[in-house]
Image (cartoon, rainbow, N blue to C red):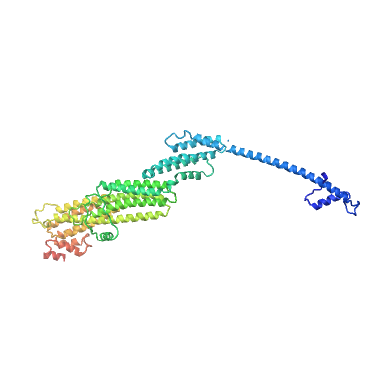
């Protein structure tokens, strides 16, 4: 067999194998070799060799079978060992689950589940490293368990019961729960939870609140609209007032344009009984509701949706505060302004102006403090600024119209006072030597009325608006007195009384604190001197500092008011 084994060489070739066997067999060589060729002997060698090969094949087969059996046995033993290792890894996962369950027993005893959860995680973080080889994985699994089971069930319980029945409470609860959850997440960021703990915690928060945040802004805007409408309706109900319908378009727009250009009070005026229909309490309530909405919007909106959501809240504020409340009050106030020829008219529009200015300041403050931070870096900023600009311009246009018509009413009231109180005999008394008054009764009443209106204007406005309105009133006041004085003929004593009246009007003009108005009355006072100056001194007075630049026709018109104007002497001196 050893000889047979030696004949096997690698690589094995059958022809070469037989050739080597023949050469090794005596008598197996060719006829020309040292030994004669012996076929019988060669045959016998072949038969013996075949038998040896068969025996060797049987032995090899038995060895193969033995090795196969051994391999199968070892495979079964390896599989069994793997199963035991897997099972042992699972006498470990079960241990973690048991630990997470047991460490939460008695952990939620306070009324604040978020505080309890934070304390629990802090306590586990200190001890988990002494128990497990991978403490960050165990702590992360505990936090996941707390969020997905304990916090999620608590949030659902708090929100679902009021989700459909009480939008106000639902929004408050959602804001509070989301805030407390994110605050807890911030505290947990200090622990080692693996590589990307920020993403891990964000996903946990999202899994709890995603169903509530998806439609948050719809709930917010719906609630804000209904709440704002209720605040306004409650106010008007308290005044027993049914809101008038303020039309838009068509005839209404045409009336508005005519009114702005001509100052005509189209349609009958409405008696508002002194009510401005502006309420600081209403404004504060609307702004407070909107402020809370902005705060919730900031917290609950996805960053990509924040500017758009904030803009929606702003448009609701504009609708209910600026249009439904302020603009309505301005329209009502305009309709309540009497015509300029009304007697004893009560002018309440300045009260509307005063309150509207205060409200504008509050509106502007909320815009800057609560809306701007939410939209400052987005395209919505320009849109909001433009909308605010348009609203303010519309309001200012109506305020200007109302103020202008109110000033006309003031002048109208002065006309009524002058017409009722001023007598022709005031400036041409029957007894020149028995005039005891320093100024006329008409002057006293007009000045008292003017001072009251000036004070009201100062209280109703601020900044440059006060000066602008007072200048306009002063100019109209001067024109009224100028034209009024030209209706009378003046004796010498009457002229003195007119000068006294104008001096009193000039004192009144000083209260305006407008240089131009005071200058007008200074000039008017100088013109009144023409009523009493001696004829020989007329030219000298007319060339004085205050009258030198006036048109000669104006000077002449005052000289003509003198009772002695027709005398040849006076006409000669003035010509």
Whether 533 is drawn above or below 23: the answer is: below
Q: In which quadrant will I find the C terminus?
A: bottom left
Looking at the image, which is closer to me, 543 or 295? 295
Q: Is residue 466 visible?
A: no
Residue at the (78%, 50%) spot, across then down: 12
Query: Residue 440 at x, y = what percent?
Result: 14, 53
Picture mark count: 0
Is 172 on the left or on the right of 257, as rendered? right
Query: Residue 250 at x, y = what percent?
Result: 28, 61
Query: Residue 34 at x, y = what percent?
Result: 91, 52
Looking at the image, which is closer to me, 395 or 523? 395
Q: Is residue 330 visible?
A: yes
Query: Residue 349 at x, y = what percent?
Result: 24, 52
Q: Residue furthest left?
A: 431
Looking at the image, which is closer to me, 194 or 261? 194
Q: Quadrant of residue 71?
A: top right
Looking at the image, which is closer to me, 261 or 10? 10
Q: Quadrant of residue 545?
A: bottom left
Residue at the (30%, 45%) spot, across then down: 281
Q: In which quadrant will I find the N terminus?
A: top right
């Amino acid at each position: 067999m050893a000889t047979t084994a030696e004949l096997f060489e690698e690589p094995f070739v059958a022809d070469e194998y037989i050739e080597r066997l023949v050469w090794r067999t005596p008598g197996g060589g060719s006829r020309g070799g040292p030994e004669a060729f012996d076929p019988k002997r060669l045959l016998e060698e072949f038969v013996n060799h075949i038998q040896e090969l068969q025996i060797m094949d049987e032995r090899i087969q038995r060895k193969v079978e033995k090795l196969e059996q051994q391999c199968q046995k070892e495979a079964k033993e390896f599989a069994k060992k793997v199963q035991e290792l897997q099972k042992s890894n699972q006498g470990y996962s079960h241990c973690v689950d048991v630990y997470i369950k047991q460490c939460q027993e008695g952990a939620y005893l306070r009324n604040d589940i978020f505080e309890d959860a934070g304390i629990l995680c802090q306590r586990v973080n200190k001890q988990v490293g002494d128990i497990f080889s991978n403490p960050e994985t165990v702590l992360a699994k505990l936090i996941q368990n707390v969020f997905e089971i304990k916090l999620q069930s608590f949030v659902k319980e708090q929100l679902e019961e009021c989700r459909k029945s009480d939008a106000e409470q639902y929004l408050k609860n959602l804001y509070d729960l989301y805030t407390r959850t994110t605050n807890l997440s911030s505290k947990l960021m200090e622990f080692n939870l693996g590589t990307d703990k920020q993403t891990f915690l964000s996903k946990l928060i999202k899994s709890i609140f995603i169903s509530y945040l998806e439609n948050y802004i719809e709930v917010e805007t719906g609630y804000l609209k209904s709440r704002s409408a209720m605040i306004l309706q409650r106010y008007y109900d308290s005044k027993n007032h049914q809101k008038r319908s303020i039309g838009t378009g068509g005839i209404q727009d045409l009336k508005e344009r005519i009114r702005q250009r001509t100052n005509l009070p189209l349609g009958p005026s409405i008696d508002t009984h002194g009510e401005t229909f502006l309420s600081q309490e209403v404004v504060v309530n609307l702004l407070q509701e909107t402020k809370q909405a902005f705060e919730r919007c900031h917290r609950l909106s996805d960053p990509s949706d924040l500017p758009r959501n904030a803009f929606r809240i702003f448009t609701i504020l504009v609708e209910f505060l600026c249009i439904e409340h302020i603009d309505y009050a301005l329209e009502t106030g305009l309709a309540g302004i009497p015509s300029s020829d009304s007697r004893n008219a009560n002018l309440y529009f300045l009260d509307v102006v005063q309150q509207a200015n205060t409200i504008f300041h509050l509106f502007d403050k909320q815009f800057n403090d609560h809306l701007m931070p939410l939209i400052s870096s987005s395209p919505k900023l320009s849109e909001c600024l433009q909308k605010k600009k348009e609203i303010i311009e519309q309001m200012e246009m109506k305020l200007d119209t109302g103020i202008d018509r109110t000033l006309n009413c003031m002048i109208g009231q002065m006309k009524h006072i002058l017409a009722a109180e001023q007598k022709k005999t005031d400036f041409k008394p029957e007894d020149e030597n028995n005039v005891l008054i320093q100024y006329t009764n008409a002057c006293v009443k007009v000045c008292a009325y003017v001072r009251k209106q000036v004070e009201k204007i100062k209280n109703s406005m601020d900044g440059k608006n006060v000066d602008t309105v007072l200048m306009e009133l002063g100019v109209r006041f001067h024109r009224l007195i100028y034209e009024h004085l030209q209706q009378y003929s003046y004796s010498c004593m009457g002229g003195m009384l007119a000068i006294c009246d104008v001096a009193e009007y000039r004192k009144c003009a000083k209260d305006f604190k407008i240089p131009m108005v005071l200058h007008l009355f200074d000039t008017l006072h100088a013109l009144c001197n023409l009523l009493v100056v001696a004829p020989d001194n007329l030219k000298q007075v007319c060339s004085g500092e205050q009258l030198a630049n006036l048109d000669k026709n104006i000077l002449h018109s005052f000289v003509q008011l003198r009772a002695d104007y027709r005398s040849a002497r006076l006409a000669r001196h003035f010509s």
